[in-house]
Amino acid sequence: MSIYADTNFFTYLYLEDGGSGKADQLMQEQHPVLPITWLLKAEVINAFEQAVFSGYGESQKRVNAELAASCQQQFRDDLRHGIVMKRMEVRQSELERLFEEISLLYTAKHGFRTYDILHVASALLLKCRSFWSLDKRACKLAKLEGLKLI
């Protein structure tokens, strides 16, 4: 795996992008097979439902239950087909070790969130070279850890 995309990227890709934005363009240009860990899958599924709860996505487009259900199904289908996504596992002991290392190194100074650290640590453990996110804080951490941003 060379590219890791976080929850923010997938949420934008499925809920906001609609096949015409930056996330879809990256997918078309790069043709990646993105790793999906248990954490990432759980977060993406919950993010779709959270968008229904809040009522709006980033573009202020109304996210209703039907749109979220459609995104859920498309995400599951894409994962099952394994063309653009593939289930990958990281060892919990390694993830815990690297999480603590990164947290102790950066969080007091930069205020990184738990999930951002978990995603960056997962990307590093999966030997990814690039990190895709639309979240500035997650991108800052990924860059500090030597991952390329697109």
Image (cartoon, grey):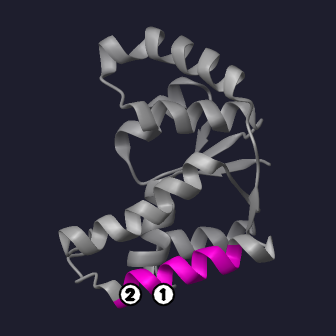
Looking at the rendering, the stretch of residues picked out in magenta corresponds to 66-78
Instruction: Please tell me how crowded label 1 is: few (under 14), some (14-19), or many (20+) other residues with Cα within 10 Å.
Output: some
In the rendered image of this protein, does residue 148 appear above or below residue 32? above
Task: Please give the name of the residue rendered at 55% of the width and 21% of the height, measured from the top-left corner.
Answer: 99
Using the rendered image of the protein, determine whether residue 48 is visible from the camera's viewpoint: yes
Q: Which residue is mark 2?
A: 67
Q: Amino acid at mark 1?
A: Ser
Q: Position of residue 73 (x, y in %)?
A: 57, 82
State the residue in front, 52 or 11.
52
Task: Please give the name of the residue rendered at 49% of the width and 80% of the height, measured from the top-left corner.
Answer: 71
Q: Position of residue 113 (x, y in %)?
A: 36, 31
Task: Please give the name of the residue rendered at 36% of the width and 27% of the height, measured from the top-left corner.
Answer: 112
Position of 59 with respect to 92 (left or right) is left
The chief SS type of the magenta part is: helix
In the rendered structure, find residue 70 and report the number of the disc placed on it.
1
State the residue in front, 86 or 39.
39
Instruction: Say whether residue 70 is magenta.
Output: yes
In the rendered structure, find residue 93 and report the number of the disc placed on it.
none
Dots 1, 2 in contact, CB < 8 A: yes
SS state under label 2: helix
